[in-house]
Image: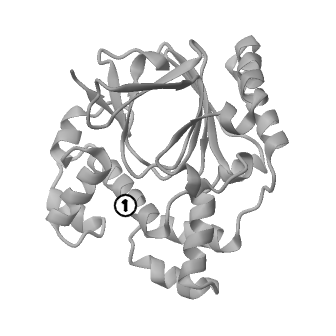
Amino acid sequence: MRSLHYIPRPPLSDFVGLFWFYEDYRQPHKKERLLPDGSMELVINLREDQTRLYDRHDTDQVRTLGGSLIVGAQSEFFVIDTAEQASVVGVHFKPGGAFPFFGLPAGELRNSHLSLDTLWGALAGELRERLLEAATPQAMFCILEEVLLARARRLERHPAVKFALREFYGIPHTRTISEVTAQIGLSAKRFIQVFDGEVGLTPKLFCRVRRFQKVLRLVRAGRRVEWAGVAADCGYFDQAHFIRDFHAFSGLNPSAYLAQHTEHLNHVPIID
């Protein structure tokens, strides 16, 4: 498999984590769970102009969208077709980083997948054609950078959201929400509104997702896992609370995730 990443220059780097390109991504399994991480993604299938998504509860049920796809901030896993990763390029937005480019509040895309042409019209098809004509992945990254800069409406975060994201990354537990709200000068209702509009998740839900991600990083660290210790380190009330939250985001219990995970933190094989 060929895998390349590129971090764009400012001001895009404040909103985009990286551009990525994968080629010849092959897996023995047909489907994978993708786990939520609190961010949004733009994904463009270069091999075929379609994307297949499977029902979370019945993976025999499939729906087809366009090959250029916006993935909203997720609070639950979704299921993809690994064959569509044969040649694909995309944009991984930082949490709260996608809202300037799509013309609607990020919360309206929560737990959704939308063909890019729904929001960008003919530009979506033009972008995919330009990417297909690009001679190298690096040339693709330059095209993506150019298009995003042209589409950006306001490359500026709300100060309250910027402050809250910094605080939540420091201690990603829901107990920090009231502390953050007290420091930003907004009512709790208004803070939830502006945060959800830029990030796509409410503050409480975002913190739960980030805590789940901290768990994944801990259990992948290569040492023997003590689940009670992981639960305590990540701020869960008890082990039962930890297991319920883990299952809510992944559809798996923690031990099953550990047994099935791939080299990619948020990709878990589904074996038919």
The residue at 46%/77% (across/down) is 177
Q: Nearer the viewer, residue 95 or 55?
A: 55
Quadrant placement of the C terminus: top left
Q: Is residue 260 visible?
A: yes
Q: Secondary structure at mark 1?
A: helix
Residue 123, image x, y percentages: 78, 29
The count of marks equals 1
**Which residue is under mark 1?**
211
The residue at 46%/48% (across/down) is 111
Residue 218, image x, y percentages: 31, 52
Toward which corner of the image does residue 165 lie, by quadrant? bottom right
The residue at 59%/71% (across/down) is 193
- Side of 106 where 229 appears, left or right: left
**Disc 1 crowd, CA 10 A, few/some/many (<14, 14-19, 20+):** many
Picture layout, residue 198 above or below residue 44: below
Residue type, label 1: Arg
- Side of 146 where 174 appears, left or right: left
